[in-house]
Amino acid sequence: MTPAFKPGRNMAMKVPPHEFEATVAFYRDVLGLDELTPAGEFETPRFAFGDKQLWIDCVPGCTQAEIWLEVTSDDPAAAAQRLAQAGVVRCDAVEPLPPDFNGYWIASPCNIVHLVSGTSDAADTP
């Protein structure tokens, strides 16, 4: 069986600390996007972006913003084999995932990080 891929609902913008507050304010105050951030002092800001969620992560040591995308698969294990056969780079060390999460990180040929997640795991992980 060939695994199917679909766009996930999450996008993450990794932002340097010196640009973080202004970036959050841009999406919240200038563009006026609906903020979906749960209550809590240390929650990651997130916004409705059409039918997607845009997460804005403050990343110490980051020198410029990056966009990370999510794709889902009905069979992440088979997807991993297909991706490996195509020479796609796994980059699981970029950010830890929960131990029970059915997914992993890859990079596109132009180094855009993608989270590949099982369809049932694609709810609230950036």
Image (tube, rainbow, N blue to C red):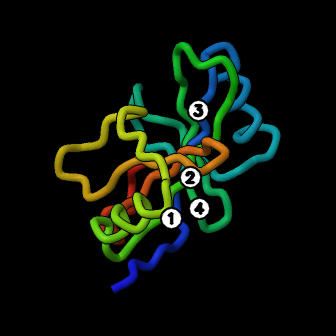
Q: Earlier in the sequence, mark 2 or mark 1?
A: 1
Tag on residue 52? 4
Q: CA distance from mark 4 to mark 3?
A: 16 Å
Q: Are marks 1 and 4 in contact (CB under 8 Å)?
A: no
Secondary structure under tag 4 reads strand
Q: Are marks 4 and 2 in contact (CB under 8 Å)?
A: no
Q: Residue at x 71, y 30 (%)?
A: 23
- Comparing 60 with 30, the one in front is 60
Secondary structure under tag 1 reads strand
In the displayed structure, would residue 43 be above or below residue 101? Answer: above
Residue topped by disc 3: 14
Q: Dot 3 surroundings within 10 Å: few (below 14), some, or many (20 or more)?
A: many
Q: CA distance from mark 2 to mark 1?
A: 8 Å
Q: Which residue is at the far right?
A: 30
Q: Quadrant of residue 66?
A: top right
Tag on residue 8? 1
On-image quarter of the N terminus: bottom left
Residue topped by disc 2: 69
